[in-house]
């Protein structure tokens, strides 16, 4: 790993550099910092990687967030508007993974049926209370022990959403989930999920204190590509609110996503 003295030496050289050797200096410095970033990623991942949390931990976390929500009105509106970009056809169903307090669970009413997948079956009655009686028949709840979704009909969903869930998962857990949900997604279906990017200080701090798990934008993209998906968009709404939109190959989906707003990347 690069020492403090070496970093200070680089800074000193940059301050003294003239236009003639600046290009060479920049190229060498860039290579050095890329090596440093790679080394830090390996170090952080090795020291931060956690085991997946038990159900009891998630139960306590959900109850805490009922009292103190982590999504403020501004962020909620940003996420809601992004969801609405996919709500243009009721030919298929939606799937929300880890609905938690049900903050976003009402935003899928444009779809034919709303599927919800969680490790906590006791969430169902609390989320159902958010809906009027006439909509109850469109809600379908499924319980998973890890990533299993075999009880959800094959090829039934054209949209998969998850917020405040995947940041807690290890990379192996994320990989398992992406492979399992592929079965329920039609060809051309989209996914919109939050993930942790420990290249940012906020995310790294959450991982260091054992709240989130370690992940980065680079690793998340590789997991998606290796799992057979096309990465459509990777950005963030604000610090700690990183998301990725991905697509299963194919063209059965009547909805085509096109993003036009500026996002941080």
Image: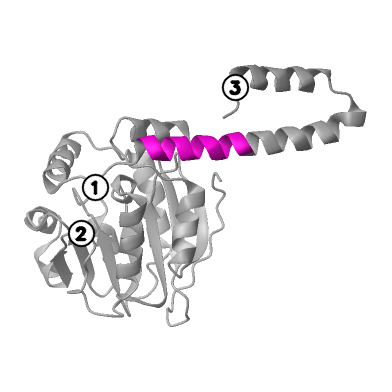
Q: Which residue is mark 3?
A: 3
Query: In the displayed structure, would residue 242 be above or below residue 15?
Result: below
Say whether disc 2 or disc 1 marks the residue closer to the N-terminus: 1
Please tell me which residue is depicted at 31% across the width and 30% down the height of the picture.
Answer: 209
Q: CA distance from mark 2 to mark 1?
A: 10 Å
What x and y, as percent, mark residue 173? 30, 55
Q: Residue furthest right?
A: 20
Segment colored magenta: 35-47
Query: In the displayed structure, would residue 234 be above or below residue 40?
Result: below
Q: Which residue is mark 1?
A: 52
- Is residue 197 something that shows in the picture? yes
Q: Which residue is mark 2?
A: 146
Q: Residue furthest bottom?
A: 252
Q: Regarding mark 2 in the picture, which secondary structure is present there?
A: loop
Residue 38 painted magenta: yes
Q: Is residue 234 left or right of residue 137?
A: right
Quadrant housing the N terminus: top right
Say whether disc 3 or disc 2 marks the residue closer to the N-terminus: 3
Q: Badges 2 and 1: C-beta atoms under 8 Å apart?
A: yes
Question: Which quadrant holds residue 65?
Answer: top left
């Amino acid at each position: 790993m690069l020492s403090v003295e070496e970093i200070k030496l680089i800074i000193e050289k940059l301050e003294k550099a003239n236009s003639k050797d600046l290009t060479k200096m920049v190229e060498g410095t860039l290579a050095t910092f890329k090596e440093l970033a790679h080394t830090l990623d390996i170090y952080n991942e090795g020291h931060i990687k956690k085991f997946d949390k038990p159900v009891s931990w998630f139960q306590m976390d959900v109850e805490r967030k009922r009292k103190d929500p982590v999504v403020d009105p501004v962020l909620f509106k940003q996420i809601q508007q992004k969801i609405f970009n996919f709500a243009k056809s009721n030919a298929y169903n939606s799937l929300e993974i880890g609905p938690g307090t049900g903050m976003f669970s009402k935003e899928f009413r444009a779809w034919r049926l709303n599927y919800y997948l969680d490790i906590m079956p006791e969430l169902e009655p609390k989320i159902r209370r958010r809906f009027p009686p006439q909509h109850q028949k469109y809600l379908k709840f499924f319980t998973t022990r890890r990533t299993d979704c075999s009880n959800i009909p094959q090829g039934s969903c054209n949209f998969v959403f998850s917020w405040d869930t995947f940041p807690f998962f290890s990379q192996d857990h994320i990989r398992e989930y992406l492979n399992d949900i592929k079965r329920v997604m039609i060809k051309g279906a989209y996914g919109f999920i939050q993930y942790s990017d420990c290249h940012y200080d906020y995310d790294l701090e959450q991982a260091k204190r054992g709240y989130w798990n370690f992940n980065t934008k680079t690793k998340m993209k590789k997991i998606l590509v290796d799992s057979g998906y096309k990465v459509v968009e990777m950005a963030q709404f604000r610090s700690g609110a990183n998301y990725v939109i991905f697509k299963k190959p194919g063209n059965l989906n009547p909805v085509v996503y096109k993003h036009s707003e500026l996002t941080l990347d």
